[in-house]
Each structure stands twice: as C-alpha cells, then as structure tokens.
C-alpha cells in the first residue's frame, strides 16, 4: 500500500475534508433555534448548536470563540452560516472563519428581526451555499492530507488489551505515511505522564507538557480531588488493573510510539504534520469538539463498555475489543476487534481492519454515530460566566 | 490440564494478561524471543488479570506494555497471580 488514497474535498486553505457540510453555527442561545430550524428546512445543512456565548469573559470566552471559528474552518465544512443574537460577535466569528479558511461565510443576527425572520434570512443564505457546495467534486487524496484525532471512553479491560493498542498501530501507520495525529486527555495520562514526556522530541515542548500536566493536578487538588491518589479505582482493580502506571499505560497504547512534536492549546490547529498532544479534558464530547475545532477530519474512538459519542462535523469511528459490547451495542460500533480477546486476531490485524474502515469513511462511508445522529458538539467551559 | 489463552503485550514483559479465567494446573504458552515458553498456572487468575511468566524477586520490576508498571512486594513465582497483593506502584504509594 504505497499509494494509500481516498476521495476527499480539497479546500482553499490547503486542508482536506472527508465531508462537505454547509455548517449552521450558533454563536449563542439566540442562534440555537435558528440553526436548528434552518437545518430542518434546507437539505444538506448541519446545525452546530449550543446554549453558551453570553457573558463569558477572558480565557473562557476566547476558547468559545476559537471553538466556533475552528469548527467553521474544519476541512469537513464547505461553507458556513453563522447566527448570533447581535451583529458584533456574530460578525467576529463569521469574518474570522472567512479570513482563515477562505470559504464562503454568511452572518445573520436575531435582534431587531426576531427568530422566525432570522430563520428565513439564514435559510436563504443556506440554500445558495448548499447549491454551491453540492457542485464541489471529490479528488484523490493521501493519508498525509488527514488530521486524525483519538480518544478512549467507557474503557474496560478490553480497551488496554485490544482497542487501544489497535489504534496505536493505526496511528503509527498514519504518522509514517506523513499524516497528522492528535491525542489529548491530560488527566488520563496521570501515572504514565513520564512515558509521554520522554517521547517529546523537543526539550522546550517536553517542559511545557509537564507544566500543563502539573497545573491540572494542582487545579484538581484545589477542588479537593487527588487524581494520582484516587487511581486505579476499585472497579479497575476488580478488572485486573494493579497500579496507576498500568492504567495509564492502557490508555497510552492508543498513542503511536513516535516522537511527539509539541503541545497544542485547546482547539489549536497543529502548525505542522506529525504527532501532537492537545491539553483537553477527558470528557468524550468535549475532547472530540476541541479536536474538530483544531481541524481533525476523522476521530478514532476506542470503547470497552460502549460510549456512543459522535460529532456533527466529523465522523467518529467507534472501535471495541469487548465481544459483549460489539454484540449488544452494534448500532453504535463501527469496528469489532474482539477476536483479539478470543486469541484469534493479532493487534496488527486489528489495526489493518481499522485502517481499511477509516479509508472507507474518508471516502464517504457514514459511521454509526453519524447515522444515528450523535451530534455531540459541546462548548468547553473553563469557569462560570459573569 | 487445559491450555488456556493469555495475551502478551510486549516481548519485554514478565507478565501476561489472562484472556479467560485460569485455574491451578492450567497451562499457558507465550512466544518470547522466538521460542515458546510454557508455564503452569499456580492459582486462580480471573479474565483480565495478570499471570507471572518468570520469577520476579521481591523489589523486582513488573513489566507490562514494555514499561515498568510497579515493583513486586514479595517474591513472585512463574504462574502466580500478579496484582495488588504482591505489587506496588512506583509513582504513588
């Protein structure tokens, strides 16, 4: 497989998408019913809805803006309509998406016209943009064009044995083919942070990683939670995990054994190809949202017990090594690697299975989460509003 | 004496994971360094738990995923259950 290719969408800014959404992005709660309304009226549109964006300030507000702008800039988005309560912030988000990604963006605000007229205005924009976007042709693309995100959730014993190592193997292949891979989950690395730290290729970035990690431990401690001391949990121990190192290593198996280039801020786009760490929470929908805002076009998600998380803009591929989950939650699972647990499949073979599925998804095959509409876009709040 | 399935993550590991419940007297086999090693299970080890593949002295390193996951608090014989009763964390105690 020297010429690994798929059919994707080449965007103006040089990025490559695997979907062709006309995204309807709510800036705040006033935009939410508008984008949801328009998505029901106009075929080919995707609502990115939430209830935040008012009276936030400082770093927390910046992250909300970066998440909305980054989502609009995601390569899976062809064009966007941005809807907010008033013109200033709505235009700020819309203009920034247009400036960074050079894609067509329209802005609509609700004050002075009301929700229904805003739906009418946004629907007219959306109709034109869908007509334009539907003409874009797919082109042959390479793995080096992809930014892939990764996370595990609802993990169990099978995650550390099967689904996480399988993703690690896929990630190594993606990196070796010149692609980009982002992992996060700052807290989940606890106990194995020294192993991740060793893999940074740059001393400055290694220090930055340990700072980010220690800052989080201190923050948790200030709230009365000792992350290091509370692991592994009783449930983990019953499942066979003995120490915090072992638990962390099970999570770390999904990180390719390659040099890590650096630390990304939440929602920050990687400045170059390769393997990157992003400082994120370990909540599935929050982490997927931040990676999508950073430009990830596909997400690989390992699950033991069956976390069904998805995202409206990027396909989230669900991989399980748990035979019971593969059977009972098959509506949510994309790739079953439980034969590893049965001793009938090697980790490498599992990796090949996931890689092939990922190429199909890159060329347009829908994931379980897309089909059942697991549209889990979520704003990450850093602290309360004013 | 059944041959039971276990999973070895890395050739450097001195423990393997039981892929089914192991009973005393069961045999398990792994490939290490190109040759097959057979071990007799000494005690009951549930699915997902670890079995020692070689002798680990008290204070010796327990290796899984090719990395140190802790230290033995007592001597662990091949075929014995490796868990919280005989291993401690080196990160957090």
Image (cartoon, grey):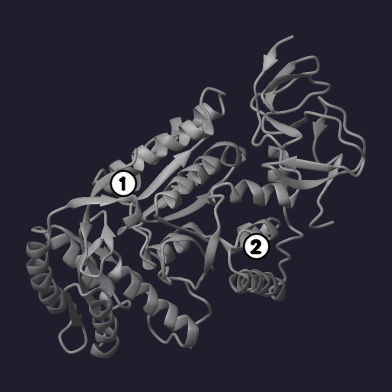
Labels 2 and 1 within one chain = yes
Is A285 placed left or right of A13 in the picture? right
Of residues B67 and A340, the one nearer the viewer is: B67
Q: Quadrant of residue A274?
A: bottom left
Asked whether residue A329 appears in the rendered view, the answer is no
Of residues A24 and A354, the one nearer the viewer is: A354
Q: Quadrant of residue A117?
A: bottom left
Distance in Å between CA atoms under marks 2 and 1: 38 Å
Asked whether residue A82 appears in the rendered view, the answer is yes
Determine the residue positioned at 54% across, 51% down. Answer: A255
Of residues A26 and A176, the one nearer the viewer is: A176
Is A340 placed left or right of A94 in the picture? right
Labelled disc at residue A241: none
- Toward the front, the furthest residue is A2
Please give the count of numbered marks on the rendered protein.
2
Looking at marks 2 and 1 on the same chain, the residue that comes earlier in the sequence is marked by 2
Residue A148 in percent (x, y) is at 40, 55
Q: Which residue is mark 1?
A: A372
Residue B72 in percent (x, y) is at 87, 42
Determine the residue positioned at 55% across, 36% down. Answer: A162
Above or below, comparing residue A198 to residue A25 in the picture: above
Is A157 placed left or right of A117 in the picture? right
Badge nearest the viewer, 2 or 1: 2
Above or below, comparing residue A243 to residue B9 in the picture: below
Say which chain tag 2 marks.
A
Q: Which residue is mark 2?
A: A197
Q: Quadrant of residue A39?
A: bottom left
Say which chain tag 1 marks.
A
The crowd level at tag 2 (other Cα within 10 Å; few <14, some 14-19, many 20+) is some
Query: Secondary structure under badge 2?
Result: helix
Of residues A26 and A19, the one nearer the viewer is: A19
């Amino acid at each position: 497989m020297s010429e690994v290719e798929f059919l994707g969408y080449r965007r103006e800014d040089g990025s490559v998408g695997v979907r062709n959404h006309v995204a309807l992005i709510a800036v705040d709660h006033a935009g939410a019913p508008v984008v949801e309304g328009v998505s029901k009226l106009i075929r080919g549109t995707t609502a990115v809805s939430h209830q935040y964006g008012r009276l936030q300030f400082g770093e927390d507000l910046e992250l909300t803006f970066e998440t909305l702008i980054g989502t609009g800039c995601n390569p899976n988005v062809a064009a966007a309509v941005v809807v907010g309560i008033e013109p200033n912030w709505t235009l700020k988000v819309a203009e920034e998406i247009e400036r960074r990604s050079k894609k067509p963006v329209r802005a609509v605000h609700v004050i002075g016209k009301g929700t229904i007229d805003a739906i009418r205005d946004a629907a007219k924009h959306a109709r034109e943009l869908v007509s334009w976007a539907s003409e874009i042709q797919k082109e042959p693309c390479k793995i080096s064009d992809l930014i892939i995100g990764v996370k595990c959730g609802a993990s169990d014993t099978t995650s550390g044995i099967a689904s996480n190592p399988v993703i690690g193997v896929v990630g190594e292949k993606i990196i070796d083919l010149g692609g980009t891979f982002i992992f996060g989950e700052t807290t989940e690395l606890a106990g194995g942070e020294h192993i991740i730290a060793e893999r940074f290729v740059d001393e400055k970035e290694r220090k930055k990683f340990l700072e980010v990690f220690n800052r989080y431990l201190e923050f948790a401690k200030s709230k009365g939670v000792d992350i290091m001391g509370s692991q592994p949990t009783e449930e983990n121990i019953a499942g066979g995990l003995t120490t915090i190192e072992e638990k962390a290593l099970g999570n770390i198996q999904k990180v390719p054994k390659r040099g890590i280039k650096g630390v990304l801020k939440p929602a920050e786009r990687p400045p170059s190809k390769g393997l990157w760490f992003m400082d994120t929470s370990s909540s599935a929908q929050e982490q997927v949202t931040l990676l999508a805002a950073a430009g990830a076009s596909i997400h690989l998600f390992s699950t033991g017990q069956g976390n069904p998380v998805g995202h409206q803009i990027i396909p989230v591929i669900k991989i399980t090594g748990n035979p019971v989950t593969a059977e009972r939650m098959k509506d949510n699972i994309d790739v079953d690697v439980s034969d590893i647990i049965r001793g009938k499949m090697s980790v490498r073979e599992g990796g090949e299975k996931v890689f092939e599925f990922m190429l199909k998804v890159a060329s347009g095959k829908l994931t379980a989460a897309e089909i059942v509409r697991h549209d889990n876009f979520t704003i990450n709040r850093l602290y309360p509003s004013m | 004496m059944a041959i039971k399935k276990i999973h070895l993550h890395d050739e450097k590991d001195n423990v393997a994971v039981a892929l089914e419940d192991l009973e005393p007297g069961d045999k398990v086999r792994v490939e290490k360094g190109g040759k097959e090693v057979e071990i007799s299970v000494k005690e009951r080890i549930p699915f997902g738990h670890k079995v020692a593949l070689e002798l680990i002295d008290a204070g010796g390193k327990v290796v899984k995923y090719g990395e140190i996951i802790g230290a033995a608090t007592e001597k662990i014989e091949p075929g014995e259950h490796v868990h919280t009763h005989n291993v401690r964390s080196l990160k957090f105690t």
